[in-house]
Amino acid sequence: MPLVLAPLAGVSDFPFRALCAEQGACLTYIEMLAAQPIIRGDRRTRDMMAVKREKGALGVQLTGCDEGEIAAAVARLDAYDYDTIDINMGCPVRKVVANGCGSALLRDVTGVYRIVCAARRATQKPLSLKIRLGWDRSELNYVQVGIAAQEAGADWITVHGRTRTENYSKRVDLAAIAALKAALCIPVIGNGDLFSSADFTHMQAQTRVDALMISRGALGNPWIFRTGAANLSLDMWLRGIEAHLHRQQQEYGNTLRAVVCMRKHLLWYLKGWPQAREWKQKVTTLDRIGLAFDLVREYAGRLQTAGVSWRRGGAHGYDFSGRA
Ligand SMILES: Cc1cc2nc3c(=O)[nH]c(=O)nc-3n(C[C@H](O)[C@H](O)[C@H](O)COP(=O)(O)O)c2cc1C
């Protein structure tokens, strides 16, 4: 089953994407871009648009509020060497929906049709949408949205099986994802609560989707694309983090930014290992990437001395299983 790394704002920069692609993600996305700064030629956005990849296909995801704006931004992105362009219709963030973007777009099915028609005219590249099931349980219009997008020329749809108002405490709705898949001819990618190969098999069996998009399951665990979050040896863990740190250094140099961006990844990497609290504390004050190498090596050394050599993969996150 093809596994895709989700566009993850603040996370899916080149070092992280490259690690996930190395482990088997067939498609990765740069961090989400807003349409207006793309159209204005904003410098920071231009920097983020740089097409950097090693393996696998690379996509870009766009957020915008109306057809003119989205089409103009798609036309700009079309000139770049991305393999595919996605329009975000799922972002639940208050600031985004207050402007009528993200999941607010789902409330107007005709508007969805017009947006996809306009974007379709602006690019020959594969074009997709990432949606939620609707605004809330009283507005479950994902099938209508999917059909509108299909008729307007979208090449596939990724569906996160929750509504805009549902948070992560509610389990992803597999029956709804299955209903969307059954209603459409274009491929559907399933997203939500994919933390292990058991989750992959379960979603695939229940929904018959064509591919799976992984989000939180990849945080601190790029190995999920290869192993499906099976047991992870301490050695593989350490080598993986060192590779991430090297890539971070190459991308950002020995800057404060390099280590600040890395702190959240290190906290995720430490999840599920024993006696990590003290080390997590140290991570929050790291101010040099060189010190991050020292920290993870020292921690791994302590675990090895204590006889801990692997972490057991859990169905939802990790349970630490102790000694080998
Ligand atoms: C840190 C973080 C950043 C995210 N950024 C984006 C984004 O830029 N675009 C998007 O469509 N979804 C974004 N999402 C949502 C995820 O792609 C995904 O739809 C959601 O987390 C459900 O999948 P999961 O249960 O496997 O995490 C983000 C999620 C997280 C945790």
Image (cartoon, grey):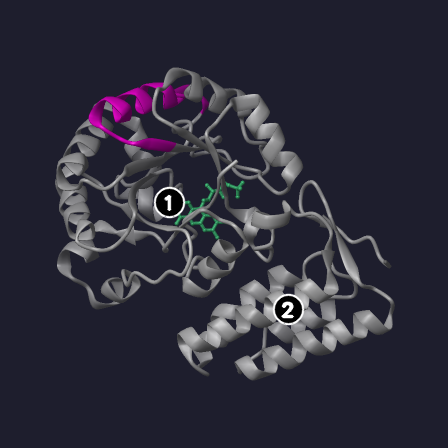
Q: CA distance from mark 2 to mark 1?
A: 39 Å
Label 2 vs 1, first from the N-terminus: 1
Q: Is residue 145 magenta?
A: yes
Dividing the picture into quadrants, the one containing residue 40 is bottom left
Task: Label 2: state its secondary structure.
Answer: helix
Picture disc at residue 109 = none
Q: Residue at x 27, y 67 (%)?
A: 47
Q: Is residue 63 magenta?
A: no
296 left or right of 86 in image: right
Disc 2 residue type?
Arg
Could you classify mark 2 by the number of other residues whose Cα lies within 10 Å: few (under 14), some (14-19), or many (20 or more)?
few
Please say whether residue 287 is visible from this viewpoint: no
* Percent coordinates x, y for residue 201 in the rendering: 61, 31
Please say whether residue 296 is visible from this viewpoint: yes
Magenta span: chief secondary structure: helix
Judging depth in this view, the residue of 156 and 92 nearest the camera is 156
Could you classify mark 1 by the number of other residues whose Cα lies within 10 Å: few (under 14), some (14-19), or many (20 or more)?
few
Judging depth in this view, the residue of 278 and 323 nearest the camera is 323
Residue located beneath label 1 in the image: 94
Disc 1 residue type?
Arg
Judging depth in this view, the residue of 200 and 38 nearest the camera is 200
Dividing the picture into quadrants, the one containing residue 267 is bottom right
Task: Label 1: state its secondary structure.
Answer: helix
Residue located beneath label 2 in the image: 239
Callout 2–callout 1 Cβ contact below 8 Å: no
Q: Residue at x 47, y 34 (%)?
A: 211
* Percent coordinates x, y for residue 19 in the rendering: 51, 60
What's the magenta region? 137-157
Judging depth in this view, the residue of 100 and 282 nearest the camera is 282
Looking at the picture, does residue 118 appear above or below residue 138? below
Q: Nearer the viewer, mark 2 or mark 1?
A: 2
